[in-house]
Image (cartoon, rainbow, N blue to C red):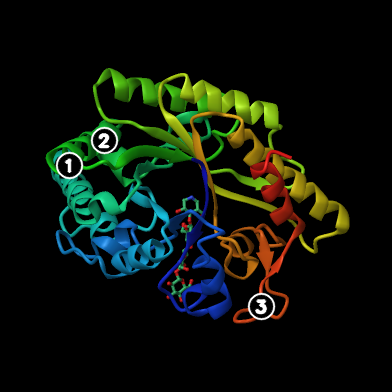
Amino acid sequence: KRWLGTAADIPGTGEGADPYYLAEFNNANEFGEATPANTMKFFATEPQQNVFNFTGGDYFVQQAKASGKEIRCHNLIWANQLSDWVTSPAVPWTNATLTAALRNHVTKVIEHFGDDCYSWDVVNEPLSDSPAGAWAANVWYNTIGEEYFFQAFDAATQAVKANNLAVKLYVNDYNIEYLGNKSIAMQGLVKELKSRSLQIDGVGLESHFIAGETPAKADQVANMQAFTALDVDVVVTELDVRLNLPATAASESQQKLDYYNTVSACVSVARCVGVVVWDFVDTYSWIPSTFPGQGYGDLFLQPGGANTPLVKKEAYDGVLEALEGL
Ligand code: G3I
């Protein structure tokens, strides 16, 4: 079994209220998995210290389960989208106080969602691009040092055991989709987790790609195999392929090939559990606001804008052909 999934920001005022978007999301024949783009993140789930809010996350679970989807819960510990009490504490953090807060968050959130989560991204984006493979700086690392990463996995491992859960524990990052210093450093983290007897079931390969600059299929396969050789699964967790606007016939067919190559790479690796696109309609993509002048990265567009019918792009056929092994 291998699923195609999507990130979604439901509920919300955008896609979560767009009937055409929702019809596609709820079509059980399309997506077998869903990832909450924002609703399970730190700021949403623990807005004040030890005061939890699962309203958005619970709604997401209900929506995804209604069409039988697995849920990759995302994420427990990250640099971004934290609550103010974490980033601007009333009393400066010490190693001990921040470690306790980190462990409490990981434990309580895992306990709440339980086996509704197929997996959790326990730590998101722990590694830096410069120098590639170093620890990324963030409040956790700056205060606790690299032990924050292992503390998060230790709390997660214990929560899974104590509650007898089946939930799988992942580490997720970008620029680890091909062999290089960052990917090799991630292999090192997997090995270290295993040597400490902490639970690590998989590595998430984000795969936010640029049309024409995507790693070759063989490179993606070799990279996936380097992880699975360590006895972990891999998932392509956030696939999109942005291009310079406006799209042209040439860039659109390049994009189709890029989508095909990544999905096909996953299909050819036994322990690649699935591919998740980071949302499926350009209207709601994170790309244009982050990379001005780029976009058109998703599988569908809405020529009439929000709340109008969806149109499949060539990229959709690329994904389908890869899944069917064409
Ligand atoms: O909800 C507020 C809204 O009230 C406000 O009017 C609006 C004005 O900016 O902002 C809205 O919040 C935005 C939120 O998405 C919901 O749309 C935030 O500004 C915006 O920063 C936030 O972006 C999210 C981003 O993570 C934050 O870094 C994206 O939706 C989300 O798709 C993106 O996802 C990340 C993954 O978690 C990790 N990997 C990279 C990926 C893409 O950046």
User: Label 2 neighbourhood size at 10 Å, few (<14), some (14-19), many (20+)?
Assistant: many
Point out which mark residue 97 bears: none
Q: Is the CB–ligand 1 distance for label 3 below 8 Å?
A: no
Tell me if I can see residue 236 in this picture. no
Ranked by sequence position, the earlier of labels 1 and 3 is 1
Percent coordinates x, y for residue 203 in the rendering: 44, 34
Give the side of residue 157 with respect to residue 209, left or right. Answer: left
The amino acid pointed to by label 1 is Ala
Picture quarter containing residue 257? top right
Residues 286 and 306: in front is 306
Q: Is the CB–ligand 1 distance for label 1 below 8 Å?
A: no
Find the distance from the CA under tag 2 to the CA under tag 3.
Answer: 43 Å
Find the distance from the CA under tag 1 to the CA under tag 3.
Answer: 43 Å
Residue labelled with disc 1: 159
Residue labelled with disc 2: 153
Q: Secondary structure at mark 2?
A: helix
Residue labelled with disc 3: 309
Of the two numbered discs 2 and 1 in the rendering, the one whose residue sits closer to the viewer: 1
At 72% from the left and 49% from the top, the residue drawn is 318
Q: Are marks 2 and 1 in contact (CB under 8 Å)?
A: no
Find the distance from the CA under tag 2 to the CA under tag 1.
Answer: 10 Å
Give the side of residue 56 with respect to residue 50, left or right. Answer: right
**123 over 311 or under it: above or below:** above
At 35% from the left and 44% from the top, the residue drawn is 119
Percent coordinates x, y for residue 263 in the rendering: 63, 41
Percent coordinates x, y for residue 268 in the rendering: 61, 30
